[in-house]
Amino acid sequence: MAHDTTEKIRSHAEHEFLKKRRSAEMRHQMTSFAIMIFLTLIAFTLVAAGFSTYLIVPIILLLAAVQVVLQLYHFMHLSNKGHGMVAFFMFSGIFVAFITVLALVTIVWW
Amino acid sequence: MSSLAQKKGVGAVIWDYMTTVDHKKIAILYLISGGFFFLIGGVEALLIRIQLMKAGNDFLSAGLYNEIITMHGTTMIFLASMPILLGFMNAIMPLQIGARDVAFPFLNSLGFWLFFFGGIFLNLSWFMGGAPDAGWTNYASLALASEGHGIDFYALGLTISGFGTLIGGINFLVTIINMRAPGMTYMRMPLFTWTTFVASALILLAFPPLTVGLFFMVFDRMFGANFFVVEMGGNTIIWEHLFWIFGHPEVYILILPAFGIFSEIFAIFSRKRLFGYTALVFATILIGFYGFMVWAHHMFTVGLGPTANAIFALATMIIAVPTGIKIFNWLLTIWGGSIKFSVPMVYAVAFIPSFVAGGVTGVMQAIAPLDYQLHDSYFIVAHFHYVIVGGVVLAILAGTHLYWPKMFGTMLSEKLGHITFWTFFIGFHMTFFIQHFLGLLGMPRRVYTFGADQGWDLFNAISSAGAAFMAIGVIVMLINIVITTVKNVRVGNDPWEDGRTLEWAIPSPPPFYNFAQTPLVRGLDTYWIEKMEGNKKGMVYAEPVGDIHMPNGSILPLIMSFGMFVASFGALYFQDDSKPWTLAVLIIGLAILFGAMLARSLKDDLGFYIKKEDLIEDAKRGGNTDGSK
Amino acid sequence: MDLNKRYTAQSWPDHPETATLEGKNKFVGFWLLLAAETITFASLFATYLALRDRGPSGMEFSSSGLFELPLVFAMTMILLTSSLTSVYAIHHMKNHNFKAMQAWLGITVLLGLTFLGLEIYEFNHYVHLGFGYTNSAFSAAFYTLVGTHGAHVLFGLCWFIALMVRNSKRGLNMYNAPKFYLAALYWHFIDVVWVFIFTVVYLMGAIS
Amino acid sequence: MMKGLTNWRLFALMTALLVFLAGCGREEISTLIPAGKVAQDQFNLLILSTAVMTFVIIAVSIIFVLAIVKFRRSKLGDDMIPEQVEGSAKLEFIWTAVPIVLLLILAVPTVYSTFDLADVTAMDSIDEEGNQENLTVNVTSYLYWWEFEYPEEGIVTAQELVVPTNERVYFNLISADIKHSFWIPSIGGKLDVNPENVNKFYLEFDKESALLDDGVYFGKCAELCGPSHALMDFKVKSVDREEFDQWVASMQEEVESPTDTTAQAGEAIFGPDGASCIGCHAVSGTGPAGMAGPNLATFGDRNRVAGFMEHTEENVKKWIQDPQQYKPGNLMPDGKSLNGGEEFTEEELDALAAYLMSLSVEE
Ligand code: HEA
Ligand code: HEA
Ligand code: CUA
Ligand SMILES: [Cu+2]
């Protein structure tokens, strides 16, 4: 059981390439962030504007869901290689979370 | 620091166990403390049966009886069955996947000590003003009305030990995901490892709702919150949901490892590979999955409405299908095999009809309208003791005999083992079969007494007599353990002679690093394959002999757990005006906890290396060191 | 593992957080913990939704009148930004740029502290209005949900600070890289929870 | 042929078992001797499911017994290495499909009954004159006793439910303190009595309780509710409609004072100038509901004292002196504290008992 990785030294070209890729990724992250801020703004504006509740609630919940997906997939890299098992458990967690919420909002009805 | 075996004094041994991070020693700790709690829970069960022996008995008072059933249920489930199973997982699973240790040895030890202190805390309630008395389900309206501190002990004690269990679950999951030996694909894992995996996943997903529910209980009772206080807008059904969202998966956390143990036994003692391995694996996963969608079958009579009841009734019934798949695959495993009736196999064989009987009554209870009659009657008591005692406890007894040589290097007596089996088995059916009919005749559960005019006398007497047989069985087993330990006849790698998986390829007990060389796994039942191919070493190695990295022992897990233990006393008495010291105790406890955590994170603990030379030296002496360093 | 081993940007592995078995274990284990945390928070949310606006008869507080949306908006922006700054920190961690990483973490901590300050201010404000913890089922559910999140923020901050202080002298190595990575993951998770808090508690409260 | 035989055996076995059990159980409380539609439906489900389960058990047992008899090592020899069979898709299919079919057989009546037994739409239906068509009883549970209010009739009783036979009776259940559960085993399954909401269901009573040995059906609290949960019993009198109407009418009448002198003395002690029992116990059939103690208007007609003790003057006296001893944790103060710090004298107890026993609405 190897506890240290066998050390690998990148060539200069490889290194430059990796740095480029990382910067590109970082720009990507900025975009996600901008989207998140934007979604938040929409959500707050919708509420401030005072549309009908039935309209707003699904929309802001959807906006929240999108933000969460952005966080999980971009900031937290859930879709990257080697995340298969953890993604599986996250989804199981979300599934249980979902039925828990469903149970308490629908079944405690009085 | 070398792996040389040396004689040690009692003190050194105790210190060794207090600081150990070796999964095999932690397994022993789990086994001892779980076994201890099993005896306590068993004595409580005997008290219950003595009280109910005849109509109008006054052996126990009403309040005391409620405390005893509550502690019996809680102890048996949280402090006996689960820890003992965790013990087996710890002892065997890493060996089965060819790992040198679990993923987080430190956390492994922390998990144990949290469980241990939680259990002690809970049981201290007996001596500190009364035990919890609202049933193991602790329904909120009664729990809030309960006087004294019993319920507080329950809520805090289970919180502590719950953290321990959660940590254990995560640890096993990561171990299985990351630390399988080369060639050990998921679909080559032994079934006990698979069930450990799924049960741990259930622990991971089911304990959070319980923890939250317990927190609400703690805050309602100790800090003036109103989650369940109806006059203040609270709702007691929330507790019921949170408890059962946890509670139903919990019963599968218990039964799945039991299934795993039996799967191993059927294969070994029939000399045959498991029939339908793939189906068994998928059935395990399916049971785990469905386990989360049926909890409201414990709440059919709450008044959730017909739609909810119908949905949950159907969802519950579906679980019979994957469970049936397992039963039939086991039957086909022994079919055409060469069955040897050693003690573990006797238990496994007895398990099938017993568990099926308990399972089918479960399906009857899933019929919601019928459950209106059965719920909270002795029929339910009969059902769950059939599945728990007929499934989990039989598995624990079987596992004890099966893995005793692997864990301790000695063989429990077959003769005494058979005596234990027969007395326990007969007693078990005698106690619980008749309870089905008590339920149908209208006897509610959780009653401390019953009138003579209701036609329940005879059956209760029979039931109580059965419990005595079980007690005899347990006592014989204790004697067996003592005799075996005193005799101390050592055994080899594969004492059952038909071992199929990796744990039987290494010495009993294994050296503390488990595998001098990591094995290469060439298929399902890898050790069997090697044996059949005449490989004398029992395995193929994936690496040359080299230095092995091992973790250091640490006392910090014990200290952290002790910190939580202390803090809990502060919280417990928080609202008692007569005790001004509570806040201080709370703070001291938390300080110990966080201090130890900080010490852990600031001090780099990089472990140590066993030198190649020592390993070779060790191998010459049979590889049988005790792991001291 | 050798703590004194020096890495250069070129010898620093591609994914330092999972380059060792310990790292991998921590990584998977931590994600599993997050899955459990998801359910913990879901239980709190579910309870909050079930108990929202429930109290003794004649309770004067309701979610529609109570909350201070501008404050919540500010808090949201701060926390979202701190999530981005921690992404920067990890970016630099992967590039083996210790100083930049520490700097970005510092910013993250500052933002987190501001958030926490605002939350304390907010709670204090509600309590002064008479909306105490023991008032009603509603208040208990509200403070417990939002407070648990706040406790997570606090814990995250302590974690960051401990890591920064502890490693300030020795820079990045294979032993602490996973720790930085996980602390950042934790921080993102806290952000995720907050997204639901501002949506479900504050926004949905304001329009109910 | 083989199949028919097993079926026949199964049937015979079940019948034998039921006869045996019926012999053991008491008609007043056994779910196996249903005395109303609801319990009958549930009993039918029990029979159906027991049949299915017996089939399952027999199927498993046959394979099981054959396997452990045929394949013992002692028979096969020590060296035999069995063939390592991997599995069989065909078999897997069979033992997936057959249970599914069995479950479907159970599922249909389950869903039907679930909705049928929860159908309380007729509860509020009114006839042309604006009267309620069906009898509704409001059940309120208190720490260890039950109150039954008949809102349409304007009457209240406790501990002993009186209902007409052969018609649907609807129930509204709510708890005054903590959770309990309302269960009359031989009439129908239970329903929880929650503190936070009203639960509704119906029951039917087919047989007049006078025909039973004890003259009443036994009702139980089925949810752990504290020390005396085991003693939180109630009784049910089912009478035909005519008799029920009479009972209602006499409940609605003014209470008359007793004629007997001992009882009159008892009334005085019971009243506001005596030990003020009246502060917690109403003695009029018209209520009010919601008092701290059970309504005693029908006390003389009762079958039990406090729900479970034999209905004798002796027991009444014992109860008044020290309720805690008999029902731990119940909320009635003991005789001493009711009587201003002194034990009731024997005469006072006699008087109270006589008075209580005289409270009756039956002739
Ligand atoms: C190890 C523990 C364990 C296990 C494995 C089970 C297994 C099952 N349980 Fe049980 N149960 C408990 C422990 C367990 N239970 C406990 C502790 C309680 C009470 C808690 C309390 O209130 O205190 C309880 C209560 C309980 C209730 C609530 C009753 C009530 O309070 O009103 C219900 C209702 O549906 C239920 C159902 C089931 C079902 C359907 C299964 C199924 O998983 C069983 C499946 C197995 C089989 C069916 C047998 C094998 C299958 C075949 C041979 C195939 C063919 C079969 C058919 C077609 C039927 N259980
Ligand atoms: C793992 C779970 C588990 C196990 C193994 C058992 C095992 C047993 N249980 Fe229990 N039981 C529960 C879980 C379990 N139970 C739960 C959850 C409840 C519900 C609680 C509630 O309502 O809240 C319950 C409730 C319950 C009741 C119903 C109480 C009531 O509703 O009023 C009864 C009654 O008969 C009972 C009996 C027994 C018996 C006779 C055993 C036997 O199998 C026990 C056998 C063991 C022994 C007999 C040990 C013998 C020990 C010795 C001889 C000691 C020697 C001593 C020294 C050397 C120091 N149990
Ligand atoms: Cu009321 Cu039990
Ligand atoms: Cu269940």
Image: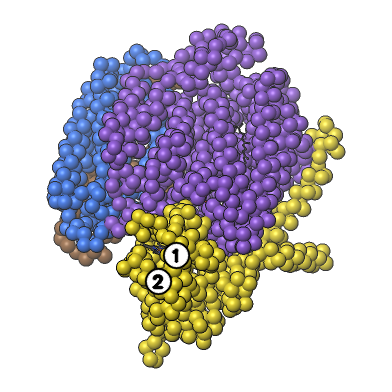
Q: Is residue D76 rendered to the left or right of residue B546?
A: right
Name the residue located 77 percent from the left edge and 37 percent from the top edge: B341
Give the percent coordinates (x, y) of residue B444.
Answer: 55, 58
C43 to D138, vertically: above or below: above
**Among the chains, which one is brown?**
A
The quarter of the picture where residue A105 lies is bottom left
Q: Nearer the viewer, residue B423 or C103?
A: B423
User: Position of B230 compared to D58: left or right?
Assistant: left
**Label 1 sits on what residue type?**
Glu
Q: Residue B251, which numbered label? A: none
Query: Is residue B443 shown to the viewer in this render?
Result: yes
- What amino acid is at disc 2? Ala
Q: Say which chain is purple.
A: B
How crowded pointer 2 is (Cα within 10 Å; few <14, some 14-19, many 20+) is rated as many
Q: Which x, y percent locates residue D144?
A: 45, 60
Q: Which residue is mark 1?
A: D347
Q: Chain of mark 1?
A: D
* SS type, badge 1: helix
In the picture, one chain is yellow; tell me its letter: D
Residue D237, given in percent of the width and then of the height, sits at: 53, 75
Q: Which residue is mark 2?
A: D265
- The residue lying at 54 percent from left, 70 percent from top is D303
Label 1 – label 2 distance at C-alpha? 9 Å
Which sits earlier in the primary sequence, circle 1 or circle 2? 2
Where in the figure is residue D95, as x and y percent of width and height?
67, 55
Task: Determine whether label 1 and label 2 are within 8 Å by CB.
Answer: yes
Q: Residue at x 46, y 26 (%)?
A: B109
Question: What count of labels does the image hold?
Answer: 2
- In front: B4, or B525? B4
Which residue is nearer to you in this view: C19 or D149?
D149
